[in-house]
Image (cartoon, rainbow, N blue to C red):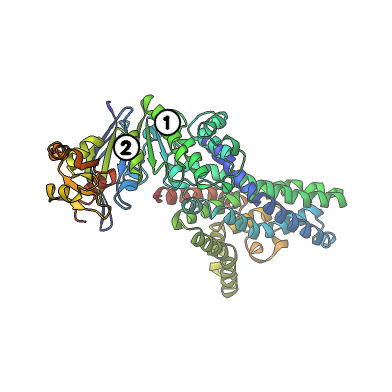
């Protein structure tokens, strides 16, 4: 455990020096504040408190931003060590490869937690400041923060796996962006096409829920929206998924980080420095 | 368990290239062995196998009685990579603190280690701004962590100035006196001469020679060169007395002979009395011995 902690401290320091902590937090805060300002308008129509509306908007934002941040922080994890030539020495130390990965994960998850916590927290403060009733939305904000961290952990693991498989930062970066595009953007477009062509047929009712649950980003969106009972208000893919029970989407967002880390571990174990 | 490192009939190929072929080596407590060879002779490959970084094809390797790369072996082995590189965003002290934690030692020892390698003044600066020699010192400092029983040092003195090299070998002497076995590779033959117990020469993946410098010198049996400077006016007479000698442009005569013929030849020269102004005996240089063994196969 002390080895994981030592690795995490070192990685956090590196990320801090490389401005990752500042960049991630500033990005989250900026987007959250913009959404908080923009989300002020529809409050009256829906009848929900202001913060809950903001959380619904932040959910859609996090689906894109959190995986992107996670992949940007992680693609360098193994490939960067290989290219700098620091990996062989590290691997001669009495520390297992899993411990190295977990140390990096701990540091990066902490940064994501800080970024989302501070960024969304800022939006919450802004909302509560202008509307005291917004306090009612705090539980959903908290849920958004921890589920964002889990979503981030999934993509951190995926980034480590790509990094270990390619062993070159340039290839790892390209693949990371490709993964983000495929899982977060194109996957949903494909599902939308499916819904439109099927027009409420058996595909929509049977395949769609499974397809949504097996994508960590979609599971995250559904979990947050259905937990806030805002699925119908959200529309789009989220709206098509009101049939999925909460425990299923919760299980998906909790299992994915473990699966991604297992993948990363398997890839890293095969890498010879 | 008498030997710290035991390698027997180690063989390793990369695709079609034979990197190591049937190499055997034993390294005991407190022994310092220098591994010599051309680039690509298999030095780094051998070190990486000992460290468990890459697998090998056949033969056996035991590091402190354990399999290379196993947790037990890694606890007792320290490694200095050829071009020591570290994360440029960390300071020397932070990097060493991290390595100390990984070995289960107190991070507070970092400054002491950096002092031992003469880097205390730069400990709080980022490694990104270090020179090659300073990075090499960070590498050295991390090999001193704990009490390693085996040190594997790949070109440890590259990038160090002559004074630092001497300090470095002094450090090694201390470690060896404490019982650590040391395997180091080098291109600089003159510096391993006095500072190692044994020399191992690898050539194209094979063990070309092994022994103390004196043993290698005897086995190579390279000719000794005697340079005779004639006294003024006796050049022609001397040249006639030693018809086998090669004359140099400086008027001096160069005689080459086997080790065994050295003394008879010397007495022949001294018999010339006043015709000889000066005499130099030049034994085969380390470079000669090294080339002799490393080129024996094929080249």
Q: Nearer the viewer, residue B41 or A41?
A: B41
Check the picture and name the quadrant holding the C terminus of chain B. bottom left
Q: Which mark is residue A7?
A: none
Q: Quadrant of residue B167?
A: top left
* Residue B242 place in picture, x, y as percent: 13, 48
Same chain assignment for discs 1 and 2: yes
Please tell me whether mark 1 sits on a helix, a strand or a loop.
helix
Check the picture and name the quadrant holding the N terminus of chain B. top left
Q: Residue furthest top?
A: B178
Q: Which chain is home to disc 1?
A: B
Q: Is residue A271 left or right of residue B2?
A: right
Q: Which chain is home to disc 2?
A: B
Q: Is residue A98 left or right of residue A125?
A: left
Does the image show residue A217? yes
Number of residues whose C-alpha sits closer than 10 Å to that of mark 1, classed few (under 14), some (14–19) or many (20 or more): few
Does the image show residue B67? no
* Residue B143 place in picture, x, y as percent: 45, 35
Q: Residue furthest front?
A: B233
Q: Is residue B66 left or right of residue B268?
A: right
* Residue B16 place in picture, x, y as percent: 25, 58
* Residue A152 place in picture, x, y as percent: 60, 52
Taking the spot 43% from the left edge, 49% from the top edge, the residue there is A266
Q: Is residue A79 left or right of residue A212?
A: left
Q: Which residue is mark 2?
A: B193
Number of residues whose C-alpha sits closer than 10 Å to that of mark 2, classed few (under 14), some (14–19) or many (20 or more): some
Taking the spot 32% from the left edge, 39% from the top edge, the residue there is B34
Earlier in the chain: of badge 1 and badge 2, it is: 1
Q: Which residue is mark 1?
A: B170
């Amino acid at each position: 455990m002390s080895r994981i902690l030592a690795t995490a401290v070192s990685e956090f320091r590196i990320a801090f020096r490389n401005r990752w902590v500042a960049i991630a937090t500033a990005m989250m805060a900026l987007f959250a504040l913009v959404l908080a300002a923009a989300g002020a308008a529809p409050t009256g129509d829906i009848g929900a408190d202001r913060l809950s509306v903001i959380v619904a908007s932040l959910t859609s934002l996090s689906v894109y931003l959190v995986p992107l941040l996670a992949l940007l922080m992680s693609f360098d994890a193994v490939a960067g060590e290989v290219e700098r030539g620091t990996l062989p020495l590290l691997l001669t130390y009495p520390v297992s490869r899993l411990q190295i990965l977990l140390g990096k994960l701990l540091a990066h998850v902490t940064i994501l937690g800080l970024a989302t916590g501070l960024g969304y927290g800022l939006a919450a403060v802004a909302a509560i400041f202008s509307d005291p009733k917004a306090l009612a939305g705090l539980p959903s904000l908290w849920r958004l923060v921890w589920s964002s961290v889990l979503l981030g952990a999934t993509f951190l693991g995926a980034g480590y796996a790509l990094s270990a498989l390619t062993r070159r930062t340039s290839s790892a970066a390209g693949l990371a962006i490709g993964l983000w595009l495929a899982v977060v953007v194109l996957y949903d477009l494909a599902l939308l096409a499916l819904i439109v062509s099927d027009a409420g047929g058996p595909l929509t009712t049977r395949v769609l829920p499974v397809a949504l649950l097996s994508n960590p980003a979609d599971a995250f969106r559904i979990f947050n929206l259905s937990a806030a009972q805002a699925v119908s208000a959200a529309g789009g893919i989220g709206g098509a998924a009101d049939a999925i029970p909460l425990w299923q989407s919760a299980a998906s967002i909790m299992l994915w980080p473990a699966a991604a880390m297992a993948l990363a571990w398997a890839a890293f174990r095969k890498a010879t420095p | 368990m008498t030997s710290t490192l035991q390698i027997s009939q180690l063989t390793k190929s990369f695709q079609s290239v034979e990197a190591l072929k049937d190499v055997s080596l034993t390294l005991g407590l407190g022994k310092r062995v220098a591994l010599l060879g051309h680039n690509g002779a298999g030095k780094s490959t051998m070190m990486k196998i000992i460290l468990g970084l890459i697998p090998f094809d056949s033969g056996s390797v035991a590091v402190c009685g354990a399999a290379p790369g196993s947790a037990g072996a890694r606890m007792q082995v320290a490694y200095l990579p050829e071009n020591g590189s570290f994360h440029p965003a960390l300071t020397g002290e932070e990097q060493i603190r991290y390595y100390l934690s990984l070995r289960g030692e107190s991070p507070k020892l970092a400054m002491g280690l950096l002092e031992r390698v003469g880097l205390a003044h730069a400990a709080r600066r980022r490694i990104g701004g270090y020179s090659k020699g300073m990075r090499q010192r960070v590498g050295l400092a991390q090999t001193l962590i704990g009490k390693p029983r085996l040190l594997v040092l790949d070109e440890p003195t590259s990038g160090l100035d002559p004074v630092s090299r001497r300090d470095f070998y002094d450090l090694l002497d201390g470690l060896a006196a404490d019982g650590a076995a040391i395997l180091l590779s080098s291109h600089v033959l003159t510096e391993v001469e006095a500072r190692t117990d044994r020399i191992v020469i690898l050539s194209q993946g094979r063990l070309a020679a092994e022994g103390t410098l004196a043993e290698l010198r005897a086995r190579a049996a390279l000719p000794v060169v005697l340079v005779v400077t004639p006294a003024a006016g006796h050049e022609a007479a001397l040249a006639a007395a030693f018809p086998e000698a090669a004359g140099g442009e400086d008027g001096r005569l160069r005689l080459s002979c086997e080790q065994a013929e050295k003394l008879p030849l010397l007495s022949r020269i001294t018999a010339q009395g006043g015709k000889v102004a000066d005499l130099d005996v030049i034994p085969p240089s380390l470079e000669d011995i090294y080339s002799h063994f490393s080129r024996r196969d094929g080249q």
